[in-house]
Image: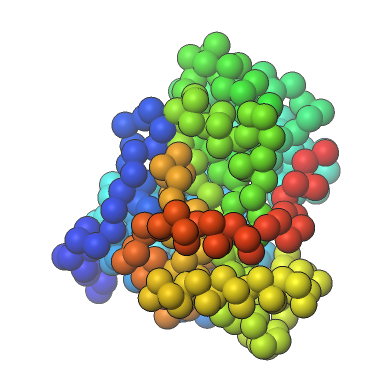
Amino acid sequence: MYLANPARYDRMSYRRCGASGLDLPLISLGLWQNFGRTTALETQREIILAAFDAGVTHIDLANNYGPPPGAAETMFGALLETDLAPYRDELVISTKAGYLMWPGPYGEWGSRKYLRNSLDASLRRLRSDHVDIFYSHRLDPSTPLHETMGALKYAVDSGKAIYAGISSYPAEQTTEALDIAAGMGLDLLIHQPSYSMLNRWVEQGEPSLLDVLGERRMGAIVFSPLAQGLLTGKYLDGVPEDSRAARDGSFKKSFITPEVVERLRALATIAEGRGQTLAQMAIAWTLRDERVTSALIGASSVSQLHDSLGALDNLSFTDEELAEIDRHAVDADINIWKARSR
Ligand SMILES: NC(=O)c1ccc[n+]([C@@H]2O[C@H](COP(=O)([O-])OP(=O)(O)OC[C@H]3O[C@@H](n4cnc5c(N)ncnc54)[C@H](OP(=O)(O)O)[C@@H]3O)[C@@H](O)[C@H]2O)c1
């Protein structure tokens, strides 16, 4: 029987999520890849329990995580009924709807029908009567935002979600969504955008997404802070066989250009000077801005998770370090989520 580490809250720090009453761990774990049928169940279980043992109280899911879609929720639902059953109230569990989940006109995007049906299906897979956060996974420009926000409000009012959030919405539509939701009496808790040293779109524009989130006091949980693994030491000398890039799915091998590798080497040298791995510095860097509530990482092994959690040991940067990082931390055209809103 699993017994959680009694010292699980000793090392992790927690940040308040915007103007809400909810704290999130500085590092959260997502189950996008590696938590489906292609990974041994015992490995999945070990990673999740190791995370909880280290104070990672937030686990992020979506209807389509796996593979195949739904598998991550099904696996996690089983864990909630067994190992994690005594600890459910110590956990913040999120899920989302927005990407393709079933065939036909009602299986993706942002309609009230899709969001309601998808949340119900997620709860069945999770064997739960509620999640803590339910997200609109991506902006649907062909559905009135009023309808999508109405579906989020329904999720909260019905008790099927405690909070609501949006993911990958640009700054302008985030403002619009916040206004529409507020008009309905719904406080949007959190935004989930991609962000890393090689993908800095949230800082760009007037106002930038981060400006909007700061001004409106909305929480921010930034995903893929390791750029899907690119911001680790693993691609400095080619593509390891067991890596995400080798699978050439969401992480295209074409991301690894000689220019990018050169930047990675420079960043790895800065990390070394700070006594960190490149992965640890990449995670700490996303957290340097207090508007970022949590860095949402992935892991395919317990040792990767532990390496990433080591970021907590050095979270501060000197101005000189930040300036030096800025010389190499430039957009590498790896934001695959930008193109996925129609
Ligand atoms: N809202 C959205 O649209 C959206 C989109 C994407 C992700 N997300 C969320 O964000 C979470 C994290 O995304 P992500 O998995 O792309 O994040 P990430 O942390 O940038 O990348 C994780 C991957 O990098 C590699 N890795 C992790 N730690 C490592 C280490 N210490 N050393 C070497 N390699 C390491 C592993 O891949 P390999 O070992 O397989 O190479 C791991 O699966 C997802 O699970 C999901 O919850 C949300």
Side of 266 where 14 appears, left or right: left
Residue 179: percent from the left, percent from the top?
58, 17
Q: Is residue 104 above or below residue 7?
A: above
Q: At 26% across and 71% down in the image, what residue appears? A: 2
Q: At 49% across and 46% down in the image, what residue appears? A: 221
Residue 19: percent from the left, percent from the top?
38, 28
Q: From this viewpoint, which residue is outermost toward the left?
A: 6
Side of 309 where 60 appears, left or right: right
Q: Nearer the viewer, residue 98 or 315?
A: 315
Q: Nearer the viewer, residue 26 or 108?
A: 26
Q: At 54% across and 75% down in the image, what residue appears? A: 268
Q: Is residue 294 above or below residue 303?
A: above
Side of 290 where 222 appears, left or right: right
Q: Nearer the viewer, residue 199 or 104?
A: 199
Name which quarter of the figure residue 85 lies in: bottom left
Q: Quadrant of the C terminus?
A: top right
Name which quarter of the figure residue 310 lies in: bottom left
Residue 258: percent from the left, percent from the top?
77, 77
Name which quarter of the figure residue 6 lies in: bottom left
Residue 290: percent from the left, percent from the top?
41, 42
Residue 128 is at least partly visible in this image: no
